Image (tube, rainbow, N blue to C red):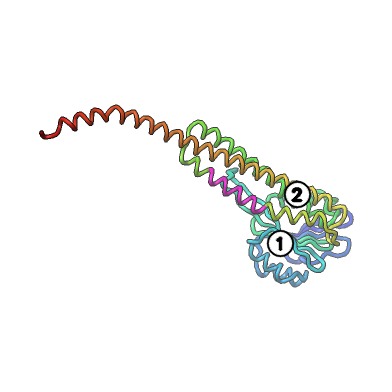
Amino acid sequence: MRVVDIGPEGPAVVTDGPERVAPPPPGVVRWIDIVKQDEQKLALLGQRFGFHPLALEDCLHFDQRAKLEEYEGYLFIVMHGFACPDRDPTNLLPRELHAFVGPGYLVTVHEDALPALDDVWRRIEGDAALGRRGADFVYYLIADKIVDGDFAHIDLVSEALDELEETVLARTHPRDLQKLFQLKRTLVSMRRTVSPQRDVFALLAKRGTAQIADRTTPYLRDVYDHLVRIGEAIESARDLLGNVLDAYLSMVAQRTNDVMKQLTILSAVFMPLTFITGFFGQNF
């Protein structure tokens, strides 16, 4: 557990441990980040914040669909991102982030390290003025950083497809087909994640709630626009993947036809000889 407090003036104050895991005093914006959650940590949240047991249960099991739930006095938001540590688009790892956005506080819960969230944490530490714009704005910074990272992952997929297209047109190999299906699974996973997430931010950008200030709404709308563009990029990549797969199958069919043509020529040459030797080899 780590906590950063942003007061009306002065630098941000960062502490570790459960001591300040509680609603902030008036005039303070508090961000609580919990990594590798367990029942004890979530029970502490429920005790000090009064979060709904169903929301805490969702935080305990990280297999949730992207969603937005409104409770009395706070919002519970589930969003997803991806990690690609080795820059291999066929090895794209999903990352899930749960957040509670309430009056003056933001609580984030995640199972794995999120570089995008750590970057925002360092920004808040270095520039407390960002945090003074509200807990909803801090959540926007995190969401925007995570969503922008998806563009880099789409670029990796597109580059891999371009390389495969050149390879397939030069010479086909069974491993190319295997990689095509791996990339297809990656795109399906990204599409399954981005589609509901787009709906979540469409709601956040439109609905007027006490937890989302009017000045933050245009920023959330920008995140929604990015998600729309990512969805379109995923569809374009799927079309390109279909074209590469068609090219692969066409090249394989062409190679099969060439082999059959050669076998036909050999058969035409040896068939008369086989007939003659077979005919005169009979026992009259």
Q: Is residue 247 above or below residue 22?
A: above
Q: Are marks 1 and 2 in contact (CB under 8 Å)?
A: no
Q: Earlier in the sequence, mark 1 or mark 2?
A: 1
Q: Is residue 164 above or below residue 6?
A: above
Type of secondary structure dominating the magenta stretch = helix
Horizontal and vertical percent position of residue 254 = 46, 33
Horizontal and vertical percent position of residue 203 = 78, 57
Horizontal and vertical percent position of residue 76 = 75, 63
Q: What's the magenta region?
A: 180-193
- Identify the residue at horizontal 54%, vertical 37% (top origin): 164
Residue 137 is tagged as: none
Q: Secondary structure at mark 1?
A: loop
> The C terminus is located in which quarter?
top left
The amino acid type of the residue labelled 1 equals Met
Residue 1 is tagged as: 1
Side (left or right) of 272 relative to 62 = left
Q: Quadrant of residue 201?
A: bottom right
Front-most of residues 206 and 243: 243
CA distance separating discs 1 and 2: 23 Å
Side (left or right) of 213 relative to 260 = right
Residue marked by disc 2: 144
